[in-house]
Image (spheres, grey):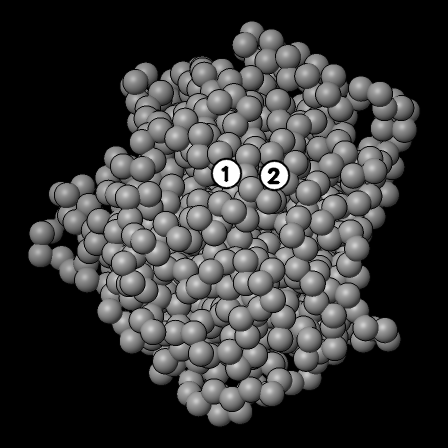
Amino acid sequence: MSKTTSSSSQSRTQILNKLSATLARGKDKDAREKAVQSRLKRHKRNLVPERANLDADGQIALFRAQAEAVSASVAEVMNRDNVPEAITAHLRDHNLPARIRHGADEKLTQLPWDKAPTLERATGPATGDDVVSLSQAFAGVAETGTLILTSGPANPTTLNFLPENHIVVIDAADIDGAYEDAWDRIRKAHGGGKMPRTVNMISGPSRTADVEQTIQLGAHGPRSLHIIIVRNG
Amino acid sequence: MDITSPAFKSNVKRAIGDKQLQRAMGNVKVGFVKKRAAARENLPEFDQLRDQARDIKNHTLEHLDLYYEIYEKKVEATGGSVHWAATAKDARDIILEICQAHGARTVTKGKSMIAEEIALNEHLEAAGITPVETDLGEYIIQLRNEPPSHIIGPAIHLNRDQVEASFRAAHTHLPDDRSLEEVSELVDEARQVLRQKYIDADVGITGANYLVAETGTSIIVTNEGNGDLTQSLPKVHIVCTSLEKLVPTLEDVSTILRVLARSATGQEFSTYTTLSTGARRKGDPDGPEEYHVVILDNGRSDMLGTEFQDMLRCIRCGACMNHCPVYHSVGGHAYGWVYPGPMGAVLTPSLIGIDQAGHLPNASTFCGRCEAVCPMRIPLPKMMRHWREREFERHLTPRTVRTSLSLWAFLARRPALYHLAASTFIRALKLLAFGRSRLKSAPFAGGWTKYRDLPMPSGRSFQESWRAGGDE
Amino acid sequence: MPETVPKVGLFVTCLVDVFRPGVGWAAVKLLRDAGCEVDVPRGQTCCGQPAYNTGDRADTRAIAEKTIKAFEPFDYVVAPSGSCAGMLKKHYPELFEDGSALKASAEALSAKTHELISFLVDIMGVEGVDAAFDGTVTYHDSCSGLRELGIKEQPRKLLATVSGLTLEEMEESEVCCGFGGTFCVKYPDISNTMVSSKVGHAGETSAGLLLAGDLGCLMNMAGKLKREGSPVEVRHVAEVLAGALDDPAIGENG
């Protein structure tokens, strides 16, 4: 699998040697190493905009406003128990079929689905035929109304892109101010320096402006993105 | 892709005479400029973030060898492979080899300027593999067999009716009487046509906006979601990228992401920013089983340690061309290769040689608008001037220019002679003008009088009248 | 504002010297009105941009050395051009090696060099001018002045004090007019597209007079307007501020 072609290995030597010859010449080797190691270990934040420096309620409000500004729709419910009804209401209001697909995330499988008796549910990664998918967000970032979703059996990545409509549940407690907060959460959940295969940062539904700079939603990914914030997740 | 940069002047003539192009460019110079200005207005720290983004890249470039050692280990630890390509040919061969090892018949592609730089599509096609561009703009120009004219809006030189014509010509399986009047109808049609291609593809190829050393991650930034479908559905994901894309940490990439979309499209953040690390994990129900990163050098390492090193900070946002009056006048194709506009005027000579691309750094008024908006604060005019210096040193500057310049410089170094010459010049012009206040043509200034009148001197030289005690 | 009478060396610029000496006289008047003592050293020629922008560093350096020397005796160097002032202020120091005596002299020149209008407002604290103009004008922000020297509000501030004058902004006033020194003759087709767009925007306003602070841009725009047969006239902003309107506008018959 990590087979390297011979041209690649020649190129590797050539490129890296040239880099070191140019960059390391006349420099203190230890100082360079130390600069790199310390930067990688410290995860020092650069300037983080003040915009999201708010209390928890402020961040939720900002997250919502920013998500709506990029054409996501947002609903808020008090408890997880309210989620199935919020989903059926959204489907009904938008003339969508009462059929969804989601992953194995317990936060989703354990919802009181009996409250939505007419809703059909399938699990697993997306097929080409799904109209609506459901995911649980790993986190949210208030500064731009961005959802953070991580890959795995709990929330397969294809559910974020292939179906026409995407519904994402996020616990209010998982909404942070800045992107950097989300990285800290990932480091905590997965161990430092380790990442899930895919981390998707999603801000609104798919769009394009490739024809005459006219913004058109639903280019290749979902045409609609609906976010359900659970206050007491 | 054929290089037409040496024919820049005839490219320009054609572009200026192209009414469709001129109409399309009219949209560019208004839309992007206003959107970026609004985004900047909306984030008080924007210019400080630009300073920091510049510093992050400078630090990374100074330690690129060390960061790459770490990055490579991280990728391999997560089940991915790193391939190094010194030249465009090396990169093409590596990618083809991976595709062939999987018996690939079709590959889907997300937008990648590096794939354009190495002319990947032609190479795959020659080997019997069908590449399918999935970014709407790239898809449109692939149908038209054209190169991109803008680094983030490949089809920005086209108008809706041209796209409609291309779709009608290509999608012959659809009814002739369908409506494609609206942009939304065009977008829908592309969506439907490409949908099955994602699912059928054997390999997905994307570019990378950034590589992260800390985690061995590659990042793509898109709005359509095509890149994500391209990389998550096929069994193999190949990332086609270049040497300068590395940044140290997720914190560092966050800072750069904050200036990227705002500078590019004026969005606060692009719709999809996707971080990919290695191959599908145990238990993952989707995602690629193999993950390859191909890192292209193609002349970039030669820029390190030179007056062109700052160009390696470029994050390909397109703000420089969005604000460039020369780009607005001629569009991207006139530049004659992959990278147009101010960033292309600096980068192209580094990659294909100044003897091929000599016009590009010369075709600038040094108005400075590109540098003023560059999120990475790259001194683009200064680097174009460095190219002119190299041309001058190598005697590539046209002989007539050199001759008149050296005559002029001879005078400019000798004030007494210069002032005499100025007065003589004025008298000669006045003779020529015959009492007229401006000339419609002048033998020595054909470039000027082709399009505009030449105003004549309004009196004797200022120096002369000052020495004479004034004419107030 | 300086406490003693400042000695100003006027850097005339080669275009003003040859094509529009009246701009030089307008500058002298404005500087004297502001309380400066003005002289015009004979040792100056051109700032060297034609060589610099063609990649000829050796000639540029030689010209820069002459200029630096010619202006050594002055407290300030003032030019009625953002482009030439920008050359002296921003680019001369880049021509010489760090630590060299010439670099130090170039930096000393840089520190005391200013474009005319920004010098009047920012250094001399001029709040207004004693001039009148009956009509509507529009203003083009020349590139070097705007982006290298930050000149934007200063000319507008002084124009606002010209009695009878109304300023109507045009679209894209900050976009290059397409002059660019030798650019306009090396790439005439692109330059023409740019200047056409520029004079188009000027023509969309109700202004009868187009102003700017750089003679290169002004000759380019005037040349285009006259070629198109437009009635819009063109002048250097200093002419209006100094009330020096006796000369016909650029390219106009007397």
Closer to us: B374 or C19: C19
Give the mark count. Answer: 2
Subunit under mark 2: B
Q: Which mark is residue B413?
A: 2
User: What is the distance, in whole Å, between disc 1 and disc 2 at their CAs?
Assistant: 9 Å
Secondary structure at badge 1 equals helix
Quarter residue A169 falls in: bottom right
Residue positioned 35% across, 56% down in the render? B430
| Amino acid type of the residue tagged 2 in the rendering | Arg
Quarter of the C terminus of chain B within the rendering: bottom right
Q: Earlier in the sequence, mark 1 or mark 2?
A: 1
Circle 1 packing at 10 Å, graded few (<14), some (14-19), many (20+), is some
Q: Which mark is residue B384?
A: none
Residue C163 in picture, x, y percent from top left:
53, 91
Residue A192 in picture, x, y percent from top left:
80, 40
Q: Work out which residue is located at the far bottom of the displayed protein and give it.
A: C164
Residue B237 in picture, x, y percent from top left:
50, 30
Q: Residue tagged by mark 1? A: B408
Horizontal placement of B301 versus B462: left or right?
A: right
Residue B250 in picture, x, y percent from top left:
72, 45
